Image (cartoon, rainbow, N blue to C red):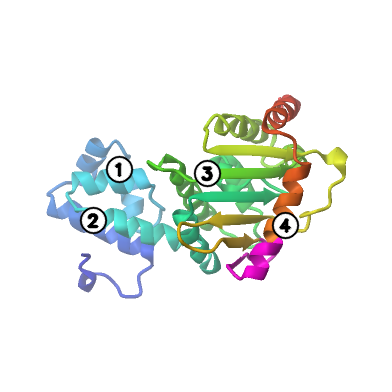
Amino acid sequence: MPDFGEIDPNAKPLEVFGAEVRKYRKRAGLSQDRLAEITMFSQSLIGFIERGKRTPSRNFARSCDDVLRADGELIRLWEHATRAASPRWFRGWLDVEQEAHTLHTWEPLVVPGLLQTEEYARAVIRGEPGITDEQVEKAVTARMERQEIFNRTAPPLFRAILDEGILHRPIGGRKVMRRQLERLVETIESPRIGVQVVPMALEVTTGILGGFVIAQLPGSPDTVYIQSAAHGHVSNRPEDVEAIHSRYDALRAEAQPQHASIALIREVEKLWI
């Protein structure tokens, strides 16, 4: 376990993680330069992380944990540190998302976070009023790490319904949009991921006030995450779950089949060249 006696009790999670990397590195008798050579991460990045100034990736934590023989402690600290980068109200949903065997989502405005490219996510997050560059990068890293659930031995079944307007909304510029639509098509190659699009021509108004996610968990009631302008709301109250299920079923009935949705995404993709 971390020797918190050597760490400022008021230190932020990233500072605690960095202090532990430094402690294990010195215990192993390695300089930052030597650790950089072994792990293939730059010395400057290691320096920033040890000072708590940069959010590490899972690969960084895993590599350092292996090289420095931390017995999983750096990975556990990484999980705590990156979770702290998410808003407090969202952390409860992260537990639900990790445990779910099936996720159904509807998005009327942006590509779902679990399918976003790093550049698209950065452009979306940067729109938060008053957010600093450091906070943007921490949030982007946290969002990208959430996508690791698709790399598990038993990844969740993920089904997304998108409003067609998402494909046309300029976020981050033409290059970012083109790559994001390419990513959507690529993800559908996985049998565990499905994407359907509701055409704008249908003038569907169900769900236009906000997105939502339905999480199905083994041995537990369904839980829903409902978006709002200020923050999201997580609930497993039967009345909330039933209302969201009804909306999802109505939207799925209007959505194009997946093969037609892929064709539509590819057509719009050409507009971003």
Label 1 neighbourhood size at 10 Å, few (<14), some (14-19), many (20+)?
some
Decide which of tag 1 and tag 4 comes sooner along the chain: 1
Q: Amino acid at mark 2?
A: Arg
What residue is disc 3 on? 157
Which residue is at a point 20% across and 68% down the rendered structure image? Answer: 3
Quarter assignment of residue 11? bottom left
Distance CA(mark 1)–CA(mark 2): 12 Å
Q: Amino acid at mark 1?
A: Gln
Residue 236 is inside the magenta segment: yes
SS at circle 4: helix
Distance CA(mark 4)–CA(mark 3): 20 Å
Quarter assignment of residue 13? bottom left
Residue 268: where, in percent of width, then height? 75, 29
Which residue is at a point 21% across and 73% down the rendered structure image? Answer: 5
Q: Amino acid at mark 4?
A: Ser
What residue is disc 2 on? 22
Asked if residue 21 lies left or right of residue 216, the reply is: left
Q: Closer to the camera: disc 1 or disc 3?
A: 3
Q: Closer to the camera: disc 3 or disc 2?
A: 3
Q: Closer to the camera: disc 1 or disc 4?
A: 4
What residue is disc 1 on? 43
Asked if residue 192 lies left or right of residue 112, the reply is: left
Report if the CB atoms under discs 1 and 2 are less than 8 Å apart: no
Image: 128 above or below 42: below
